[in-house]
Amino acid sequence: MDGSLAGHTAAWPLPDVTNHALHAALWRSGFENKAHAHRRGCSGNYSDDRDRKFGSLLTAGPFPVRENGKGKAWFFPRPTDAQQASSVMVTHRPVSSLSGIEAPWRSSSLPAPLKYAIGNTQAPSKEAGGEPWISREAIESYIRGIAFSSSRHFLKDGQIADQEAQIGITIDPETQTTGHGSATGKIYSAHYLRLREGFRLGLLAKAIDEDYAPNGDSDLIRGLFNGYPAQIVVGGQQRICTAHREDVPAEGWPLPCGFSRSSEFTRLSTGKFAVKWILLSPAIWPEIPGGQSKRGTKTNSHTGGWLPNWVCPNSGQVLLRTVSPEERRRRRSLHYNGEGYTSEHGGALEIAAKLVGALVPKPIVVTGWALPNGNYGIKGGAKSTHFAVPAGAVYYFEADSADHAEALAASLNWHGTEAHPTGIKNRRSTLMGEKGFGLGVCGSWDFYGTSADVPKHD
């Protein structure tokens, strides 16, 4: 065993883990003979064989779900700017002291394009912060600035799952055997999670496939879990989990909803309107080199990492655009007539908003291992490694008007502008959004030292 420390590998499963588990389960189910088949390839270079299936699978989660006689309670990562135990009070706020400087990052440690540092409103303390998991009700109270302190809505990791330590024998990556090559005489220690009684992994999933429609229902997930209890293999350790499918409850989706109306966003002393975006699931924003795009247009480079690819790395301008219902109908008519767009952005409207602050924890590693498959030309081996922004990260924006604040929220909220959501509208991760990365909700914010530091009550 290398080193003097035991391994600490136990962590809450990332969204791609459960997505891959469902994808593999669909292949094991025998549905491939009924599902729609796609060709492999991209950018006009496609294979002749249609061997790509189950591409319609969309997931969100997993999140901890506590089951009891009163129903189910979903929990989500605590926002990074609310670090008081058993509370949703905002403890970190942007500081306006650098607002008069045109480029604050040139005279401080702020990275471009940020304008405001984030200050802690609490006295110095050795406490680690609040519980890492809070309920949907607690998050919605946090967004609305309402005091909330019911202890059962705040959970520590140990209340959800136990860590089990196991010793294993190292496998040589070249020969896939033990006791040979670089694995000679090596063992390893690893920790795994075992959910406590009454907790489950909560996952939203659907896979609409028009070629599969028994009794008129084209959802492959419904067909996969048509009995109880069902079993599914999850994770690289190939652990068997029981699975139970339920329809989304009539009273609403289990994910928390954010601000979506212009009247809900604070007007700052600067005259701008404050929008805050909180990640509910990790997001991956890769580095993008400059050059020519596939369509022949010039593309600018982007650092990625903690900075969303839809934010200009120099000015902080939000690069997302909105499309009106009239413009959407026009685009559809052009498509049906075989015509192209006549402008660079196809009539999409710019959102006048800039990123001005961010509170981002340390990144998490997203990777995996692919098994070789000669039938599909897959050599196997380690997958690309990405650094993801963890859930709970907070991004602060200034919008030029209340209408632009509303437009920004409509583009960032997972539910868009719907007060009673019917589905997930936005997944703002550049990579693996279909697997549940990049879900978030919007709130508002104010500067450090304002009346906003005093919590409101119902």
Image (cartoon, rainbow, N blue to C red):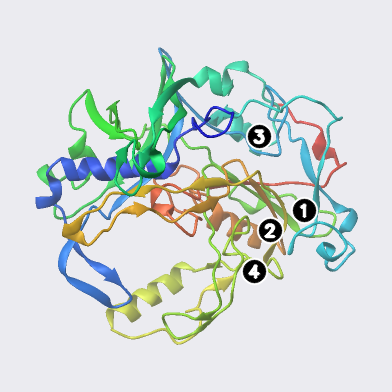
Q: How far, Cα to Cα, is label 2 from label 4?
A: 21 Å
Can residue 243 be seen?
no
Looking at the rendered structure, the kind of residue marked 2 is Ala
The residue carrying mark 2 is: 402
Q: Quadrant of residue 85?
A: top right
Q: Is residue 105 left or right of residue 284?
A: right
Q: Picture coordinates of residue 65 (x, y %)?
A: 44, 26
Are the residues flagged by discs 1 and 2 in contact, CB closer than 8 Å? yes
The residue carrying mark 1 is: 267
The residue carrying mark 4 is: 312
Q: Picture coordinates of residue 172 (x, y %)?
A: 36, 43
Q: How far, Cα to Cα, is label 4 from label 1?
A: 23 Å
Q: Picture coordinates of residue 407 (x, y %)?
A: 59, 60
Q: Is residue 346 left or right of residue 38?
A: right
Q: Is residue 439 above or below residue 74?
A: below
10 Å crowding of disc 2: few (<14), some (14-19), many (20+):
many
Q: Residue at x 57, y 64 (%)?
A: 309
Which SS class for mark 3? helix
Q: Residue at x 32, y 44 (%)?
A: 20
Q: Picture coordinates of residue 47 (x, y %)?
A: 20, 72
For discs 4 and 1, the disc positioned in front in the rendered view: 4
Which SS class for mark 1? loop
